[in-house]
Image: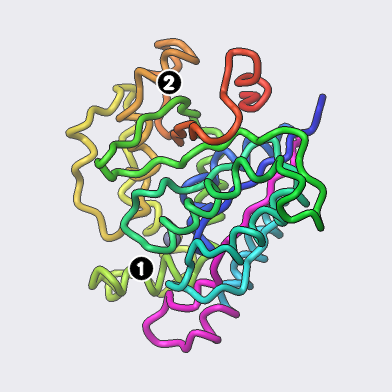
Amino acid sequence: MEQLRVLVIGAHPDDNDFKCGGIALKYLEKGHRVRFLSVCDGGAGHHEMTREETAARRKKETEEVARITGIEYDVWDIPDCCVVATLENRMRMVNYIREFNPDIIFTHRTNDYHADHRNTAMLVQDAAYLLIVPNFCPETPAMKKNPVIMFTSDRFTIPPFKPDIVIPTDDVTDKKFEMMNCHVSQVYEWLPFTIGKLDRVPKDAEERFEWLRCPRVPRNGKPMKLKDLNVPTDHNHSEYREAADAVRYRKTIAKRYGKKVAKQTLFAEAFQVSEYGSKLTKDNIDKLFPF
Ligand SMILES: [Zn+2]
């Protein structure tokens, strides 16, 4: 088997875990190499700690993710909320991607609520073609071929996300929640604070881990419908979030895996191909998505 090199590029030190944690674990299980890059340091993501304290703590959280999964996790030093698609950052991105030499890259779309997400997506798209241009950043050898670039799913509508491939993640969802559980400063502190629910977070580590996953989706053999997704939750990270792409894109799952699997799938992650990387074709899709 040829080992794939998979690069996930998110703005903040948790975006990759939320959007690609499942598929990353599936690649690792098959013996492929997975690297996560957080383009900024995440230092703005707390209501009590300073930028320096927050960035240092979040770096440790990414190291914990790396320890429990085998993902290589890099965090750049760009300050949180300050990612800009400058020429300097474009060159940094081109050099960085070339050095890892990925077969496939996952990142945000450029229409997104957060300026860091938009600019990270822009940096990846700006790098895309330049990866193979030897006279740009000649200090790092140009790649022979552009990687395939995939966008992670979101709910923004102008234009809407349209999945090209949807991967069932039921087999890795337990572990994905363990990854999210590593980002203590976010899932149990900052994110609940931003929605006024900090007082809902249990103090005990085991209780709060269960709280993170709750409410759990029904396991009664009946496929959930779109309207079933409208349940009140304390936060954005319950099982319902992991189920959303499986429910919304059941037809796309059925196209690849058949109706039976699509019906049984509880959790999934969805991806759309970028026009600016290599094409996703009948010939390469099963190699790049070997599950
Ligand atoms: Zn983010």
Q: Quadrant of residue 116?
A: bottom left
Residue 144 pos. (x, y %)? 77, 35
Expressed as whole percent of the image width and height from the top left, the position of residue 114 reads 36, 61
Residue 209 falls left or right of residue 228: right
* Pick the front one: 66 or 285: 285
Label number found at residue 253: 2
Q: Amino acid at mark 2?
A: Ile
Residue stretch rendered in magenta on the structure: 31-56
Q: Are marks 2 and 1 in contact (CB under 8 Å)?
A: no
Q: Is residue 274 above or below residue 127?
A: above
> Residue 42, percent across and down?
50, 72
**Category of crowding for the residue at label 2, using alpha-carbon neighbours closer than 10 angstroms: few (below 14), some (14–19), many (at least 20):** many
Whether residue 167 sits left or right of residue 230 in the image: it is right
Residue 178 visible here: no
Report the residue at 61% width, 66% height from top: 88
Residue behind mark 1: 191
The answer to whether residue 110 of the structure is visible from this angle is yes
Q: Earlier in the sequence, mark 2 or mark 1?
A: 1
| Amino acid type at image mark 1 | Leu
Asked if the magenta segment contains residue 50, the reply would be yes
Indicate the secondary structure of the residue bearing disc 1. helix
- Ligand 1 located in image quadrant: bottom left
Say whether mark 1 is within 8 Å of ligand 1.
Answer: no
Q: Residue at x 25, y 42 (%)?
A: 158
Q: Tell me the crowding category of disc 1: few under 14, some 14 to 19, or many 20 or more residues within 10 angstroms, Cα based.
A: many
Could you say which is closer to the camera, residue 260 or residue 20? 20
Q: Which mark is residue 282?
A: none
Identity of the residue drawn at 55% across and 33% down? 171
Q: Quadrant of the C terminus?
A: top right
